Image (cartoon, coloured by chain):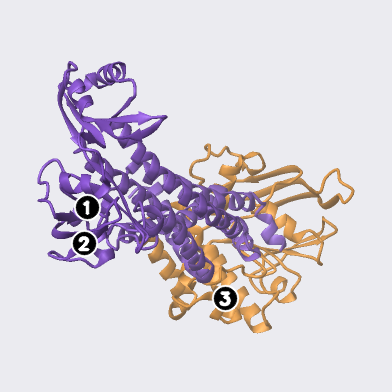
Amino acid sequence: MLELTQIRKVFNGGLHNEFTALTGISLTIQPGLVTVLKGASGSGKTTLLSLIGCMDRPTSGRITLAGHQLPGLPEASAGGVELTGLPERFLTEVRRRTFGFIFQQFHLLKGISVQENIMLPAYPMGEAHPVLLARAQQLLETFNLTRQATAKVEWLSGGEAQRVAIARALMNEPPVIIADEPTAHLDSHLSREFMAIIARLKAEGKTAIIASHDPLVYEAAGVDRVITMRDGRVEEDRTVEP
Amino acid sequence: MGKGLQRQRHILDFSLAALLRRKGKNLSLLLVYTVVVFSLASVMFFTQALKREAAQLLSGAPEMVVQKTLAGRHELIPAAYLEKIRTIMGVASVRGRLWGYYYDPVFGANYTLLVPEAGEPEPGRVTIGQGVARARKLVLGDLLTLRGADGGQRLFEIKQLLPAESELVSADLILISAADFTTLFGQPVGSFTDLALTVRNPSELATIAAKIVAALPDTRPLSRDDMARTYEAVFDWRGGILIFILAASLLAFAIFAWEKASGLSGEERREIGILKAIGWETSDVILLKFWEGLVVSLSAFLLGIILAYLHVFFTGAPLLAPALKGWSVLYPDFRLTPFIDPAQLFTLFFLSVVPYTVATIVPAWRAATVDPAAVMRS
């Protein structure tokens, strides 16, 4: 469970171009559900996602993670581990074990194979190569990419690249998937396919947090909660009835 | 295999894949880098091997040589000096030596004429070095013509050629009999070019030298160590001059390498951002760039060293020979004994591999400390 309390994020603080991206955000994100952050460009969705995903720290407020086993971290108290106060080293550790990221542009590394792209997040973890390989091959199979395993990512179609990005996000077996505008560069068919994969992952017990202003995403079956944002604040928080 | 080692292995694997992705850039860098290491290592190996060769040859030289000087210049030493020195305590033996230089205007070369201690040729016959034989196209039994001090031409039969192994110092040598030497140069009988001494106790060389100077103030004793130092200085000077010339290319390379290594392209910056965003730590990115830098610089270093070794010890250093060996126009033709000084190799390693590796790490470190959230916003 992720709990956000009075989150505020200011960019360029104290400068003439100071900009408040988020203010007064308090949310509780339940595990095993699909939550969509909806809102226009500049509403603060991506900033909120990067704070939840430990890529950035809030200017003020607290983010607490509970219910996940985090090796190397102090024993989680009943209230969970407060991520905002963790040193950089631990924050990276939390990020790579807890969250899998899917970016708007997919951000795959050109010039290397599909399989290598999928394995990349696991390299610094120091697991044995055969273990990594087995896990990558399992993901390739799951996402119907076995034939493209040795192909370079620049040769892939949009749909294939999207599946590689999802497989990479799952490489470290994270409990939470974070996706930022994942359907921005996809046609309707591929967008629906993406949401079908998310529904499958939810069924497997994963938590998904998606930022999107695409109706194909926030109106998709399997979405449990839609949080509408505007000007860095939560405008509406709606639970979707099954 | 431990987790730490596995991490190193994965990141090294990935750095090799990353290097292959930028083949053009990295291969051109490797080529220039190899050429620089090759040039420096060639000069280093060659100078070192020459010094060693000279030192080995000098080990057979007399312990001390005594010359007579006049107004600070070397002149002939009378036989009477020999007798006087023989009586000095500690001197084991004294022998008068006859040697000099002969300028051959046809070939523009200087020959060294020497009356050997043992195996003196019979009058009318000579033994010559390989360089003289090559220059004048002489074989055994041919006649060598030398012009005497009186202007008359004298003919000498080639009795023997000096072995190629000693060519570094014997290329321009002509061994001649004492009688022919004095006649050819018109040298007064009862005088020598200098005197060669052996002593009973080598640790007393300095004391004996002082006694000689006290007894014969117009003489100059030279120990074998003095001569060895002179050789060393000459080869060091030649090597130094070449290194200085190479410094220009080294500087050009440094600028080239710095620009290539330190200038991260937009694509590389983007990749570092992605790696950070998918869970790599700053230290992982630095490790990646460290391996990349080390692979390029170590490959160039090893390649350069191996090529330099082959160049110097197997092909006779055709690129350096004219500048580094020989005393005159008669270039000695010989194969050097392979010898590598670990200290020099270590210095070269530190001057080539370390700066490049650091140059690749610093900008990567700067790029890797960026906020991974920047990737989300891009």
Residue at (39% x, 62% y) in the render: B319
Q: Give the number of marks.
A: 3
Residue underneath mark 2: B144
Label 2 environment density (alpha carbons within 10 Å; few <14, some 14–19, many ≥20): some
Image quadrant where one finds the C terminus of chain A: bottom right
Residue underneath mark 3: A161
Among the chains, which one is purple? B
Residue A2 relative to residue B122: left or right: right
Q: Give above or below for B179 relative to B73.
A: below
Q: Secondary structure at mark 1?
A: strand
Q: Which numbered disc, 1 or 2, marks the residue that appears first in the sequence?
A: 2
Label 3 environment density (alpha carbons within 10 Å; few <14, some 14–19, many ≥20): many
Q: Is residue A98 visible?
A: no
Mark 1 → mark 3, Cα distance in angstroms: 81 Å
Q: Secondary structure at mark 3?
A: helix
Q: Secondary structure at mark 2?
A: strand
Residue B362 relative to residue B1: left or right: right
Q: Quadrant of residue A47?
A: bottom right
Q: Amino acid at mark 3?
A: Ala
User: Is the residue under label 2 in contact with that under label 1 (CB below 8 Å)?
Assistant: yes
| Mark linked to residue B331 | none
Disc 2 sits on a residue from what chain? B
Camera-nearest label, 1 or 2: 2
Mark 1 → mark 2, Cα distance in angstroms: 10 Å
Q: Colour of chain A?
A: orange
Q: Amino acid at mark 2?
A: Leu
Q: Amino acid at mark 1?
A: Ile
Q: Position of residue B42 (x, y in %)?
A: 38, 55
| Mark linked to residue B174 | 1
Q: Are marks 2 and 3 on the same chain?
A: no
Disc 1 sits on a residue from what chain? B
